[in-house]
Image (cartoon, rainbow, N blue to C red):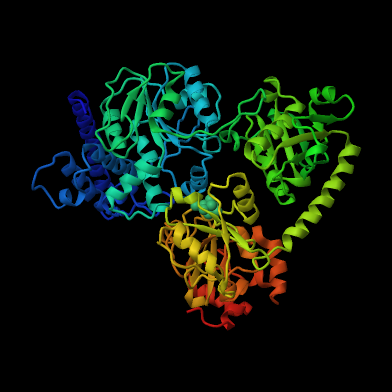
């Protein structure tokens, strides 16, 4: 690093350190040293300090101690303290800056200054990023939908440039964090002035107004290695290596750099994240360990995003359908409100449906969009409400009827990924809105067909050769075709319902999360879907057909070793090889003995409650205290990272109502506690399954947070009062 920059970075570190020190003194005076603090919804204390040193900061006193260690990093002396040897060489003043920023931000939380709020516009900045958000986004980061994330610090030269840079990142599905300012302005303010939607739904997240707020993004990065990578707190080498190899982050500092920006940048570089500046900074080349430049510049704002992508080596896979609106999964969460709606279809306002049907290659014409309905153009241009039947026909040499539902499920995403158009539901309960702005951009009815044609090809290139789309807009015809579709759905559901683990000879693996959790493999069977809830057996099968060398591989079941536990020779062999020997064997139908591992993106956690002789189930995002005596965020920390933890397991929601759920442990009747939200979600199928198990009112017997939170006595009282079957079952341990 050049001398000038090094001294700017060191000045910056001292400035941040001083800020933290002053605020610390104030808080100690106000609240005392024993004041307990934790960031919202996290199990990782002050994650940067925790990840790098293993020190769990729980109180203001701990902050004081951590700040002392930071001071030692700033003034390294050969014999200074216990911390120095413990921390090692890799952590220097850059890391010290991040520690000091983290303490300062924590103190600001105690003061009630975080998350920040812009009084003028009412915007509430995100502040600390919770574990829940991290887990929610995990799958998108691993399956390539979200190739990486960018921290923009400062302000663009003008509002339009800010919009262009952010739009370009959004179109590439790169998650954008905003922080800091430059000359009194910031990208957050620039986007607000242009009326651009901000937030998690659109992948643009304002963290705070100062450079120091960038730390929230780095805090989220450092947790990835502990949540998904199974790295231990304090293993700074492991954590740093994971950041460099697997977390595809970069910074775009816009506008002139000051000392704090240099100091924070030095910390980020320490984590392996390069920066591309729009000012004439000295370019800093790698010192050997990094394969890319650490600091680079691009003065042309139309090229800066591309430059950053190259410097960090991101893989971008986006192909845009030929329609006059922007396209990308960043727009998926965007809503179209009633007052912004130009025209809508379905959603109980008009009859509608959407279906995908397999056809023979000779029966359809690729790219043909047929619109059936008198004067359809005028009727569309008039706006309001119209009936709509979307009939997608797909043909291909490798197409199978089993892939119809998979293509059909993507129709939702196809529409939602367009900017200014919105989709909800599926089958005959779908609902589509086209906004005034999309209409003004020139979006037509035909474009709905064009999107489905292009995206079906993009997503299913190796199984689909031809796609033809017909849109019906006359009510009578929509109703008639809807009946036809309903027949097809009925047959399809019957076929899938009859499928079970016994009558197939191949399961599928999902290895997508290995990029995050190298020793985790999801084994997906017809009766057990992936723990993220996003991939079932058919998805695995289709994905394998689409990309035979991809993340889903067939597993030949081979000889059954134990049909009650769910153990097969072929599966054991497969996981041994796919986990590099980390795992020897696995039982699919029990939580007690070599259960399936978890990566970190589980929809729910099942956890044993020994005193109740059963299990509890909680979904990701639940914030209350649990009967196991901790919150979801803490519990989740014990389940991830690709290790087998008997008694604890991550699962997809739909597994709860599978006949194979805890089959070897007594099944459904083992559930003694489940959140209300989960009960509501599984209600219908649960009722059927419970009846099959001979306890039709089981769901009512299961406790939830309104009956007992961490109080196990209350839980037990309830269970015996209602006569819960688990109390009569064989002991779990
Ligand atoms: Fe990850 Fe398993 Fe989901 Fe695949 S199925 S994305 S491995 S959690
Ligand atoms: Zn995962």
* 585 left or right, relative to 349: left
Q: Position of residue 129 (x, y in %)?
A: 43, 44
| Residue visible at 58% across and 45% down in the picture | 547
| Residue visible at 27% across and 33% down in the picture | 266
Q: Is residue 704 above or below residue 554?
A: below
| Towards the viewer: 507 or 198 | 507
Q: Is residue 82 above or below residue 122?
A: below
Is residue 359 in view? Answer: yes
Figure quadrant of residue 258? top left
| Residue visible at 71% across and 33% down in the picture | 453
| Towards the viewer: 245 or 686 | 245
| Towards the viewer: 507 or 656 | 507
Q: Is residue 379 above or below residue 57?
A: above
* 324 left or right, relative to 273: right
* 609 left or right, relative to 259: right
Q: Position of residue 540 (x, y in %)?
A: 60, 52
Is residue 425 in view? Answer: no
């Amino acid at each position: 690093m050049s001398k000038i920059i090094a001294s700017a970075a060191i000045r910056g570190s001292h400035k941040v350190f001083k800020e933290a020190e002053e605020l610390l003194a104030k808080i100690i005076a106000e609240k005392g040293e024993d004041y307990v603090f934790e960031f919202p919804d996290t199990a990782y204390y002050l994650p940067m300090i925790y990840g790098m040193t293993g020190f769990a900061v729980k109180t203001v006193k701990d902050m004081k101690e951590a700040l002392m260690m930071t001071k030692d990093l700033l003034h390294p002396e050969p014999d200074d303290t216990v911390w120095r040897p413990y921390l090692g060489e890799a952590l220097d003043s850059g890391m010290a800056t991040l520690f000091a920023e983290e303490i300062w931000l924590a103190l600001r939380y105690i003061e009630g200054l975080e998350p920040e709020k812009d009084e003028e516009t009412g915007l509430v900045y995100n502040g600390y990023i919770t574990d829940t958000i991290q887990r929610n986004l995990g799958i998108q980061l691993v399956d390539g939908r979200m190739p990486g994330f960018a921290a923009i610090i400062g302000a663009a030269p003008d509002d339009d440039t800010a919009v262009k840079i952010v739009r370009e990142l959004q179109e590439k599905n790169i998650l954008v964090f905003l922080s800091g300012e430059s000359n009194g302005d910031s990208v957050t303010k620039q986007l607000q002035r242009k009326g651009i939607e901000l937030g998690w739904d659109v992948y643009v997240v304002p963290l705070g107004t100062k450079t120091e707020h960038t730390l929230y993004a780095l805090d989220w990065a450092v947790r990835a290695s502990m949540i998904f990578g199974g790295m231990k707190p304090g293993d700074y080498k492991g954590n740093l290596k994971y950041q460099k190899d697997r977390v595809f982050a970069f910074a775009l500092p816009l506008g002139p750099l000051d000392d704090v920006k240099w100091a924070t940048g030095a910390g980020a570089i320490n984590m392996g994240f390069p920066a591309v500046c729009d000012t004439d900074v000295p370019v800093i080349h790698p010192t050997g360990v990094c394969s890319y430049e650490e600091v680079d510049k691009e003065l042309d704002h139309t090229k800066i995003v591309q430059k950053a992508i190259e410097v960090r080596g991101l893989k971008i896979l986006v192909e845009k359908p030929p329609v006059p609106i922007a396209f990308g999964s960043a727009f998926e969460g965007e809503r179209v409100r009633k007052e912004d709606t130009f025209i809508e279809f379905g959603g109980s306002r008009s009859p509608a449906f959407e279906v995908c049907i397999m056809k023979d290659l000779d029966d359809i014409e690729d790219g043909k969009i047929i619109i059936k309905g008198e004067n359809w153009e005028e009727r569309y241009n008039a706006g309001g409400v119209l009936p709509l039947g979307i009939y997608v026909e797909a043909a291909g040499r490798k197409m199978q009827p089993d892939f119809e539902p998979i293509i059909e499920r993507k129709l939702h995403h196809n529409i939602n990924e367009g900017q200014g158009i919105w989709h909800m539901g599926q089958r005959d309960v779908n609902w589509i809105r086209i906004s005034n702005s999309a209409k003004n951009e020139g979006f037509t009815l035909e474009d709905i067909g064009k999107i489905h044609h292009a995206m079906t090809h993009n997503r299913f290139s190796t199984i689909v050769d031809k796609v033809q789309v017909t849109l019906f807009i006359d009510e009578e015809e929509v109703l008639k075709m809807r009946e036809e579709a309903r027949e097809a759905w009925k047959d399809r559901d019957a076929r899938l319902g009859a499928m079970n683990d016994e009558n197939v000879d191949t399961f599928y693996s999902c290895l997508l999360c290995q990029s995050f959790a190298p020793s985790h493999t999801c084994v997906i069977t017809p009766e057990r879907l992936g723990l993220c809830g996003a991939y079932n057996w058919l998805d695995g099968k289709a994905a394998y057909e689409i990309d035979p060398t991809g993340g889903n591989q067939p597993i030949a079941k081979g000889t059954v070793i134990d049909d009650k536990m769910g153990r097969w020779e072929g599966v054991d062999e497969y996981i041994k090889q796919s986990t590099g020997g980390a795992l020897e064997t696995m039982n699919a139908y029990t939580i007690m003995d070599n259960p399936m591992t978890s990566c970190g993106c589980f929809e729910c956690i099942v956890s044993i409650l020994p005193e109740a002789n059963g299990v509890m189930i909680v979904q990701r995002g639940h914030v209350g205290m649990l009967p196991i005596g901790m919150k979801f965020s803490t519990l989740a920390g014990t389940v991830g990272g690709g290790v087998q933890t008997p008694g604890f397991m991550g699962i997809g929601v739909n597994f709860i109502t599978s006949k194979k759920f805890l089959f070897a442990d007594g099944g459904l009747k083992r559930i003694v506690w489940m959140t209300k939200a989960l009960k509501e979600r599984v209600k219908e199928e649960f009722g059927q399954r419970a009846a099959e198990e001979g306890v039709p009112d089981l769901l009512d017997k299961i406790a939830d947070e309104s009956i007992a939170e961490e109080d196990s006595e209350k839980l037990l009282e309830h269970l015996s009062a209602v006569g819960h079957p688990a109390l009569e079952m064989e002991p779990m341990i």
